[in-house]
Image (cartoon, grey):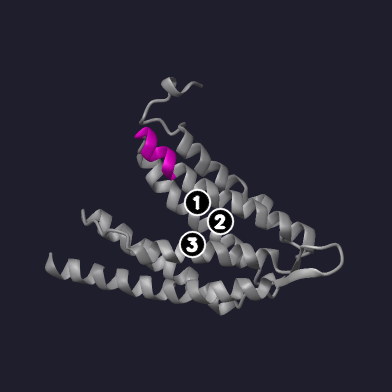
Amino acid sequence: MTQSAIKPHSIWNIPNILTMIRIAVIPLMVYLLLNGEREPSFWAAALFSAASFTDWLDGFVARKMGIVTVFGKFLDPIADKLIVMTALIMIIPLDRVPAWMVLVILGREIIITGLRGIASSEGIVIEASELGKFKTIFQIVAIIALLLHYDYHWFFSSEQPLLIANMHNVGMFYLWIAFVITIWSGVDYLARFIKIITRA
């Protein structure tokens, strides 16, 4: 199908296809994380990284081509949440992340999604804050590192590694930052929601 044949209102456009691909890779990522071994974990991290890149790419293409559909606006945030929460839930039994932390992050996403649905049904638009963007960035970095998990050596000579990084520790460092921003942004969104509805 050529670009000229794609109608703006059709679900079969490049941004939506990228979003659907992001959802389609979730089962493969689940399979790769079943045993937690080093090589499958590496490929799960690579898959998650590629999927995260498509999240930026589909938004870029949609803006560049002027393609905005109701289907895309509905599916894109769902795809983002599905792949993030799948990755976090799958590494709980691998002891790579505390279950309570995942529960709080998941609870926040459910609450904010519910509030957005209520606001939308009332014709209320609450703009996304910069906090949400920072939350997403730190979550992605943290999850990639937690998926890698193991020690990785960077060699600048044939004898000794110059740098040894424990990716689990790197991931937890960034996850704690993401966790704080997650709570902060959730409270901020809730406060703005209450402020708007009490004025209505």
User: Alpha-carbon distance for marks 2 and 1?
Assistant: 6 Å
Q: Could you tell me the amino acid type at mark 2?
A: Ile
Residue at 76% x, 57% y is: 40
**Mark 2 Cα-neighbour bin, 10 Å: few <14, some 14–19, many ≥20:** many
Q: Label 2 to label 3, Cα distance in Å?
A: 14 Å
Question: What label does residue 79 carry, if any?
Answer: 1
State whether residue 153 is above or below residue 100: above
Q: Are marks 2 and 1 in contact (CB under 8 Å)?
A: yes
Could you say whether the residue bearing mark 2 is in a helix, strand or loop?
helix
Q: Magenta residues?
A: 59-66
Residue depicted at 39% across the width and 64% down the height:
132
Task: Answer with the quarter of the image where residue 155 lies.
Answer: bottom right
Can you tell which of label 3 and label 1 is closer to the viewer?
Answer: 3
Q: Nearer the viewer, residue 101 or 174?
A: 174
Residue nearer the viewer, 153 or 141: 153
Classify residue 119 by image quadrant.
Answer: bottom left
Mark before the other along the chain sequence, 3 or 1:
1
Compare residues 148 and 7 and report the one nearer the observer. Answer: 148
7 in relation to 183, above or below: above
Q: What residue sits 60% from the left and 53% below the top?
A: 49
State left or right for residue 172 relative to residue 129.
Answer: right
The residue that label 3 is drawn on is 137
Residue 4 inside the magenta-drawn segment? no
| Residue at x-position 28% and y-position 60% | 118
Read off the residue under disc 2. Answer: 83
